[in-house]
Amino acid sequence: MSTAFASDNAAPAHPAALVALQQVNDGSAAAYGADEVTAHAADALRETFGCPDAEVLFTFTGTAANIIALASAVQPWQEILCSDIAHILVDEAGGPVRLSGAQLTRLPSSDGLIDPTALDRHAARRGPVHHSQPRIVSITQSTENGRVWPAPAMTQFVDHAHDLDLLVHVDGSRLANAVAALGVSPEEAIGDADIITVGGTKNGMLFGDALLVRTPRHFPGIRFVQKQIGHLASKNRFVAAQFLAFLRDDLWLRTATHANAQAAQLGAGFQRLGLRLACPVEANEVFVELDAETHRRLGEYYAVHQPDLEVPVVRFVCAWSTTDGEIDDVLNTLRGLL
Amino acid sequence: MSTAFASDNAAPAHPAALVALQQVNDGSAAAYGADEVTAHAADALRETFGCPDAEVLFTFTGTAANIIALASAVQPWQEILCSDIAHILVDEAGGPVRLSGAQLTRLPSSDGLIDPTALDRHAARRGPVHHSQPRIVSITQSTENGRVWPAPAMTQFVDHAHDLDLLVHVDGSRLANAVAALGVSPEEAIGDADIITVGGTKNGMLFGDALLVRTPRHFPGIRFVQKQIGHLASKNRFVAAQFLAFLRDDLWLRTATHANAQAAQLGAGFQRLGLRLACPVEANEVFVELDAETHRRLGEYYAVHQPDLEVPVVRFVCAWSTTDGEIDDVLNTLRGLL
Amino acid sequence: MSTAFASDNAAPAHPAALVALQQVNDGSAAAYGADEVTAHAADALRETFGCPDAEVLFTFTGTAANIIALASAVQPWQEILCSDIAHILVDEAGGPVRLSGAQLTRLPSSDGLIDPTALDRHAARRGPVHHSQPRIVSITQSTENGRVWPAPAMTQFVDHAHDLDLLVHVDGSRLANAVAALGVSPEEAIGDADIITVGGTKNGMLFGDALLVRTPRHFPGIRFVQKQIGHLASKNRFVAAQFLAFLRDDLWLRTATHANAQAAQLGAGFQRLGLRLACPVEANEVFVELDAETHRRLGEYYAVHQPDLEVPVVRFVCAWSTTDGEIDDVLNTLRGLL
Amino acid sequence: MSTAFASDNAAPAHPAALVALQQVNDGSAAAYGADEVTAHAADALRETFGCPDAEVLFTFTGTAANIIALASAVQPWQEILCSDIAHILVDEAGGPVRLSGAQLTRLPSSDGLIDPTALDRHAARRGPVHHSQPRIVSITQSTENGRVWPAPAMTQFVDHAHDLDLLVHVDGSRLANAVAALGVSPEEAIGDADIITVGGTKNGMLFGDALLVRTPRHFPGIRFVQKQIGHLASKNRFVAAQFLAFLRDDLWLRTATHANAQAAQLGAGFQRLGLRLACPVEANEVFVELDAETHRRLGEYYAVHQPDLEVPVVRFVCAWSTTDGEIDDVLNTLRGLL
């Protein structure tokens, strides 16, 4: 059974990541991120995102980056808002709630894109001691359904949240795909968000995500939280070196551009087969409607994922490594099943 | 300033670890540890420790392994016991307490070696609803002060804890050093402990520790806890492959044996300089008494660590990579300062 | 400004409660609920609800009873389900989440009445380590909108939840009003629910709620949780004595019957004024539609509550002490405002 | 078996408390502490302790007051310090740790009296991300062993803690006994402590303790925490009224003075029997050395408590209600057993 389209998590590491590991494995180095490679990688992230005063932390996984961001943003009597399909809501085993102790409230969305006015009602509940107090909203760029927040919509959302005295977290485990799709600067793709998970794993690294903390005063204990859950790497150069390699010469955007292009090609192929896409293909994910029997039979050949048990939709994810041949193969397989 | 003796954390990765990464980076693979490399590495750990029925989990760091073990062992009205110098008590930023919600109680120890009868008083407090209920005791092999539990002492301690209906966790971030020092089988070095952190990072990997869960019925939610704090690696083959490489041909014991030998040599060198060792050198750490002025001046050359602010003792840690030249250099530097 | 209809919380204590306090204040008694009054009150609760094997705990408040029940039911990687208007979701400041660490998920409801099939989708998500695992569903009898679960609907809901391997908690802070309204036995009003908050405060006591734990095996640490948050009363006879007084001769149902009757009368009065009720009056609460200006002006005379900021509905609650004169007064005031 | 000396918790309520309940049970009142009785009681507490700007909260129990104070003082990566016999350490079932998520570290003490310099070592560990960060120290006045902090010692301790940037909590569940014993003003008995649990239950109320928050800026979420664990009483006038009654005409000090005097008398009686006191009798508790057999046989007549399982010491607590006759009886019983 092929895992080719199971997830960008299932992809191999890009060769540049391995080369980078090799290059920094040179003698002993200060532990826990006090080394020079880490400093350079943090600088590279600050420069890429045009925020010279941001704090940068590295983690091993995107889930870790998300929960560190959220748990250091809130008190356990405050509230976290997110979309109804947010990874932090449905795919992190309740970690954000466990670690923060805070209530996590879902907002209605269109494939993860949230209307800014959905925040108003929650902000208005602030004050009385009987209610959790909204403090931060988390959005995903590109979203879990493969949609991309256009730069103006992102700006408008973040600004509206700030007007309501809400912090904004961007889960950017696929941020590269969004930046590549939008063709804007990395900065424009995240608006004035306070804290951003910058994904590395799904972009082609072996492992590693980063946190860009643009308003550090709102996350005073964040380095303690990182340490407390075992994401302060003692040999952090091995995370940082991969970021350095990917940010150099825009490798992170080239891998994403490829993944996006393959997804577009796959989506077009599905449509040629007469299949309906469940939502527009804007980044590197394709959601296609498949009847139960076809889905079942496809599962004999491919590890594909049904995001919601109630609707007959199947997800295909393209990665930096997805080849034209793999796309042809899955389309041929499907043609045989239909 | 040299980081040569700062910690086994500061050492580079062993070349075999990088080769292993390269070898498994071959096409896509099932995510989240469902891949074959992970299965083989788990088998290798079970075989090495002679426990065919154990569950095996991988994490990125030793802190993570420790807190996942502890947090899945207790309810938040139960108590965790440990030594007065335990890493989980003094060097994990309170992570074990935060994640478990359980009280963490220190027991007196001799360099981390605990008299089994120290458990009796705590076990006797069980019952009344007013007290935290002791559930698990965590010991470290080799200890934070570089001492090694002899196999009979380990057996006696674990058996006594079990008699008192306490689970036993072994923090084995330096377990290899203990096994190498004792010259016994890995199994003998851990007695019948219920759950063991098997260190990889300090043993020469880029990153990666494992949890050996020998009594899985006592840790029912452990895989959820692992996921909740971001230590279920999506590309887990890159952790597992390193364990496979290190367990093959006893590489993990050869690296540890070397580190232990270098520590012995360094300790002997200190004594020849007329310095007093604060405790016996039994594994890969050396604790030497240094007056404040010498310590200060040494700090201009070497990043060395004073474990306790009140006593003039300095820690030197040897790693798989510590060379004779490095030992000569630090001894010469010290000779110049004394 | 009158607080007559603000809440059954705002009502005075029934004289029988004060008499009961006086009667048991006789010399010293074993602390922490080991006294005889507590034993008798627990027996009285078991007898009233026909469950001789239930465990009984007393708490000072309903919020406490709810969070003790929920926090002892779940692990922090499990999920709690409740209605979209549940007190535990919107009016306990996030306490259930903070104490349990578990994700709290809202289900759609009709005024707090939940279709049993709404549980299916969540139960089906069980298994994968990525998702919180549903463990308990909490419903409210009578609901926060003053609706009553008919006995057959209650049975059907609880049985369906059990079929899905979900525990059931009943928040019965107004359980007396439901039993009185239904005219069934207390047992029939709660089906086979596992754990029930039996309200005292809103029923006319000075303070005090109870927990009826019918399946104690599912709540092993419940007495520790009670202690941990300061709800194990040292002088528990003063809670228990009130329950004894209220359960004797069905005082608890007589106070509830009165409150229900007054609510019915008030609701009929609103309708005679041409006002629309937002939902049927089935227990002791009345929800009436009022335009913003009338609501504002009414607020000069009465402390009344707008449950949701988006809809122009105002809540009136009747208590054991609500008089016909108070009802006439509020209706006259409103007539003057309309 | 008599509970006469089991605890001041086992004593009946003072008649004045019941009278106070009766007097305020007059019609409906604003819920959740927005009533006038609560406002008056808060004023009375502020006046009694000479801190006009303090915030006042009421809780049902002392454990609740303690954990609300501590949990709102710390982040879960900070540390709470306390004595080795502190109630929060050994008798609250781990509640302070569970609710705060913070590490609780015991300091050596003499019967609960702590040398201020014991704080220095912990404050010095601040900074590195590897360690829990000390934030607040909790002391008990009078201590769990019936000792009293003299006013100068209290001042010195609090000032030293403040110099080290530590907040100070005073667990004053028996604060009245300390004030009465010292013969100083209430203010002098607590120094410049930041937050004080003012005990009511052990002083003769049916239930009820208060929190005096003198530096509210350090406890920003305290009212949310109070609500979250069910200690925001809906009918709070019934807690507040008792405080009003006890603070009026110094009833709280008269009850404490009596209890202290009875303890002194009991201690003297023990000494006349040739028994040794384990520590000086300074407030309302007497700790006497009893051999195991005498203790066992005494337990047939009296519910007395052995605070530590390892030493043959038994605790006797006197209350506002302890009579000369009760003292004579227990001394006679003991004389018969010796």
Image (tube, coloured by chain):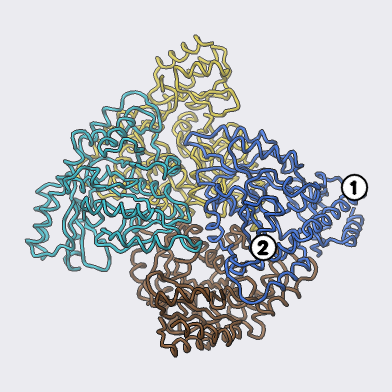
Chain colours: A blue, B brown, C yellow, D cyan
Q: In the rendering, at what x and y percent does residue C92 appear?
A: 48, 39
Quadrant location of the C terminus of chain C? top right
Amino acid found under the numbered disc labelled 1: Gln
- Which badge, 1 or 2, comes first in the chain's sequence? 2
Q: Residue at x 55, y 15 (%)?
A: C271
Q: Is residue D242 left or right of residue A116?
A: left
Indicate the quadrant where residue A325 lies.
bottom right
Q: Is residue B321 above or below residue D11?
A: below
Q: In the rendering, at what x and y percent does residue C296 appear?
A: 52, 18
Indicate the quadrant where residue D118 lies.
bottom left
Marker disc for residue B206: none
Would residue C37 be visible to someone looking at this image?
no
Q: Which residue is mark 1?
A: A271
Q: Residue at x 23, y 54 (%)?
A: D153
Quadrant location of the N terminus of chain C? top left
Q: Is residue C324 above or below residue B62?
A: above
**In the rendered structure, the residue with mark 1 lies on which chain?**
A
Asked which secondary structure carries label 2, the reply is helix
Would residue C98 be visible to someone looking at this image?
yes
Asked which secondary structure carries label 1, the reply is helix
3D distance between C-alphas at marks 1 and 2: 45 Å
Q: Is residue C28 above or below residue A317?
A: above
User: What count of labels does the image hold?
Assistant: 2
Query: Nearest the camera: B293 or B27?
Result: B293
Q: Residue at x 47, y 75 (%)?
A: B297
Q: In the rendering, at what x and y percent does residue A215 appear?
A: 59, 47
Outermost residue toward the front in this view = B336
